[in-house]
Structures are given as C-alpha cells and as structure tokens.
Image (cartoon, rainbow, N blue to C red):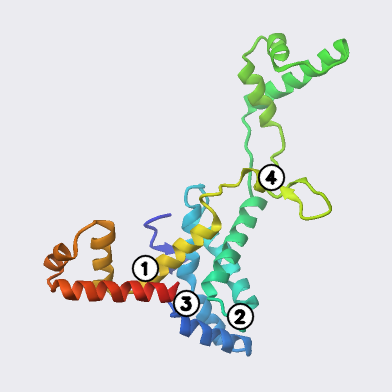
C-alpha cells in the first residue's frame, strides 16, 4: 500500500489538506444543509483516511477496498460530528474511520483451512468419539495421537483448525455491570489506540509546518545534530535556528 499514488482513481499525492479553521467553517455550513460544503469536507479529509488505512497495510487487504470503507467512516464522522463541542474533527473522525474498517475486516474475514488439515481433523473427531464410547471419558491429546499414529502437534493443529474463531468482543465475564471481553484480556497496553491517535495528531501538526522548520526539527531531533551543525547545513545563523526551532515546537503544541 505504501508508495501507492492512486487509490480508487484518486491521486493521493494531490489530496487537499484543510486547516482546522477551514474544517470547522465547512462543518457549520454542512450542519445548515450545504451539500457543497459537505463535499469539500470529504475531499479535504481524504488524506486522513489514507493515513488510517496505512495501519492495516500488512494485512494483505486490497487498498482500494479499505479506502472506500474508510471514506464511509469519514462521511459518518462528518454527519455525526457535534460542532458545539471543543474537539478537533480529526480526533473524532479517526476512531470512526478505524471502527468502520475494523467492522469490514471482521465481517469479511475468511478462515481458509487446507483439505489435508480438515481430513486430519475429521479423523481426530472420529477417534475421539470411538475412545469415549469405549472408555466413557474424553481422551487426552497423547491418546488420540497414539490411536492415529501421528504427532501430538498434528492433533492440536487439526483441532484448532476447525474451532470457530472467537470475537475480540466476546464477553468472558459479567457481574451486573460492564462485561469483560476477550479484548480486555489480550489487549496490548503499550500500542493503544490512544498512543496511535497521538502519533497521527503529531504527524498532522508537523506536516503543517513550513519546509525549513520541518528540516530543522528533522536535523535536530531525528539526526541528533547541534544547533551549530544545523545552522551550517541550512545556511542561517545559530540564533535563527534556535528561534525557528522554538517557533516550530510552539506551533506543534498549539496544534496538539
């Protein structure tokens, strides 16, 4: 997906980016029934959709399909956004886009099991049924493997292959309150949606900086150069580097 310059006939390299003030003005017009403003909002936030679907680029899904689904999430975000709240649109829109894509992936997942694996699974089930009829108890994995003269690992893989996948939203415990889901038990406490949203917000803030300020921040904080080294490379004084660096960081703080 990375490096793809055209998705669904849209040239991603030429996507427009709206400033927050422009976005809010268009949202107000949209709430008043201005359909042209709604179209401008959609077109001006397609880059937001593109940044979201890049999170899913390692899943082997078609980029065009994910982009279209992401656009549905964007439209829902536009139609449901409350302009009376002091919230940036991207803060509300990104989770809506992510949710729409996750729903699509959940509804269209296909667990493909090989024929040989299915055949092994059926043999395991037959052996299990025969053992239970003879011993009035369930056999262990080792006992099934011995009956079929196969490896223990093959029995385990075969049984897992025919087991229905469990939804991350499957409740595992509930005590007259909010249910505890599978997701709560296996979630990654480090790479959370919150930290990912902060990363997107930071990237969005940096993208709005002038090219010279972006270069200075890159040299200072990504390449670890001193202000003196940056001034020599950029061709300005150290004092100017210091002033531009402070100004850029202040702009990022305001954006965040």
Relative height, residue 20 to residue 47 (above, below): below
Q: Residue 142 has which mark?
A: none
Q: Secondary structure at mark 4?
A: helix
Q: Which residue is mark 3?
A: 44
Q: Nearer the viewer, mark 3 or mark 1?
A: 3
Pinpoint residue 186: horizontal percent, then vertical percent: 62, 43
Alpha carbon of mark 3 to alpha carbon of mark 2: how far? 21 Å
Q: Secondary structure at mark 3?
A: helix
Q: Nearer the viewer, mark 1 or mark 2?
A: 2
Pinpoint residue 34: horizontal percent, then vertical percent: 59, 89
Badges 3 and 4: C-beta atoms under 8 Å apart?
no
Q: Which residue is mark 2?
A: 85
Alpha carbon of mark 3 to alpha carbon of mark 4: how far? 37 Å
Ranked by sequence position, the earlier of labels 3 and 1 is 1
Residue 229 horizontal side relative to residue 252, left or right: left
Alpha carbon of mark 4 to alpha carbon of mark 1: how far? 40 Å
Badges 3 and 1: C-beta atoms under 8 Å apart?
no
Label 1 packing within 10 angstroms: few (<14), some (14-19), many (20+): few
Using the rendered view, name the quadrant where residue 12 is placed. Answer: bottom left
Using the rendered view, name the quadrant where residue 146 is placed. Answer: top right
Label 2 packing within 10 angstroms: few (<14), some (14-19), many (20+): few
Q: Residue 13 has which mark?
A: 1
Quadrant of the image for the N terminus? bottom left
Q: Nearer the viewer, mark 3 or mark 4?
A: 4
Label 4 packing within 10 angstroms: few (<14), some (14-19), many (20+): some
Pinpoint residue 225: horizontal percent, then vertical percent: 20, 59
Ranked by sequence position, the earlier of labels 2 and 4 is 2
Q: Which residue is mark 4?
A: 182
Question: Could you say which is closer to the camera, residue 21 or residue 129?
Answer: 21
């Amino acid at each position: 997906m990375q490096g793809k310059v055209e998705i669904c006939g849209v040239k991603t390299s030429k996507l427009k980016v709206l400033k927050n003030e422009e976005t809010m003005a268009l949202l107000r017009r949209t709430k008043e029934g201005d359909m042209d403003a709604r179209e401008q909002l959609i077109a001006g936030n397609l880059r937001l959709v593109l940044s979201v679907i890049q999170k899913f680029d390692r899943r082997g899904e078609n980029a065009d399909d994910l982009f279209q689904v992401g656009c549905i999430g964007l439209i829902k975000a536009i139609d449901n956004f409350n302009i009376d709240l002091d919230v940036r649109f991207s803060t509300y829109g990104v989770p809506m886009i992510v949710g729409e894509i996750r729903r699509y992936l959940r509804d269209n997942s296909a667990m493909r099991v090989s024929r040989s694996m299915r055949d092994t699974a059926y043999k395991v089930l037959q052996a299990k049924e025969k053992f239970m009829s003879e011993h009035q108890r369930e056999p262990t994995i080792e006992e099934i493997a011995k009956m079929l003269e196969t490896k223990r690992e093959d029995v385990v893989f075969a049984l897992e292959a025919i087991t229905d996948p469990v939804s991350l939203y499957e409740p595992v415990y509930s005590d007259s309150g909010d249910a505890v889901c599978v997701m709560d038990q296996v979630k990654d406490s480090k790479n959370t949606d919150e930290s990912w949203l902060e990363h997107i917000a930071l990237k969005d803030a940096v993208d709005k900086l002038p090219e010279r300020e972006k270069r200075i921040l890159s040299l200072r904080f990504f390449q670890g150069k001193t202000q003196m080294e940056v001034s020599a490379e950029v061709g300005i004084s150290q004092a100017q580097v210091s002033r531009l660096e402070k100004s850029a960081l202040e702009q990022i703080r305001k954006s965040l």
